[in-house]
Image: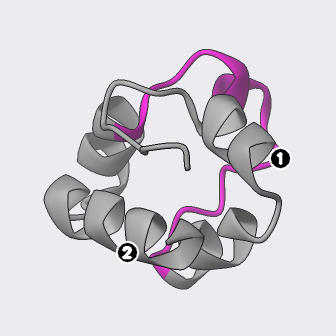
Amino acid sequence: MARITSDMTINDVIKVDRKLTKVLLEMGMHCVGCPHAMAETLAEAGTAHGVDVDEMVRKLNAAVA
């Protein structure tokens, strides 16, 4: 099982499992399809969008468990 971490890019997270897109969208991370998703880490995106990064990582890991 892959472990999601805050230093992974959004694109890397989606590559782990496409269903994680839903979790990201539910958390207000509507940048999953934008060019920044290729290089922006979860930590960077969370900070930019005012999302609690630790909570996001917990939810993403729970979804792939």
The residue sitting at the top extreme is: 39
Q: Which residue is drawn at 66% across and 26% down?
A: 36
Q: On the image, numbered disc 2 is attached to which residue?
A: 59
Judge whether 42 appears above or below 56 on screen.
above
Residue 47, disc: none
Per the rendered image, the range of residues in magenta is: 27-42
Residue type pointed to by label 1: Gly
Identify the residue at horizontal 40%, vertical 39% (top origin).
Answer: 42
Q: Position of residue 56 (x, y in %)?
A: 33, 65
- Mark 1 or 2, nearer chain start: 1
Return the residue at label 1: 33
- As for residue 53 lying within the magenta part, the answer is no
Q: Is mark 2 on a helix, strand or loop?
A: helix
Question: In the image, is 41 to the left or to the right of 1?
Answer: left
Among the 4 quarters of the image, the one containing residue 6: top left
Up-down relation of residue 23 to residue 5 (above or below): below
Residue 34 highlighted magenta (yes or no): yes
Percent x, y of residue 63: 53, 76
Q: Which residue shows up at 34% across the image and 24% down it? A: 7
**Which amino acid type corresponds to the residue marked 2 in the rendered image?**
Lys
**Which secondary structure is most common in the magenta stretch?**
loop
Residue 45, percent from left and from top:
41, 40
Residue 57 percent coordinates (x, y) = 32, 57
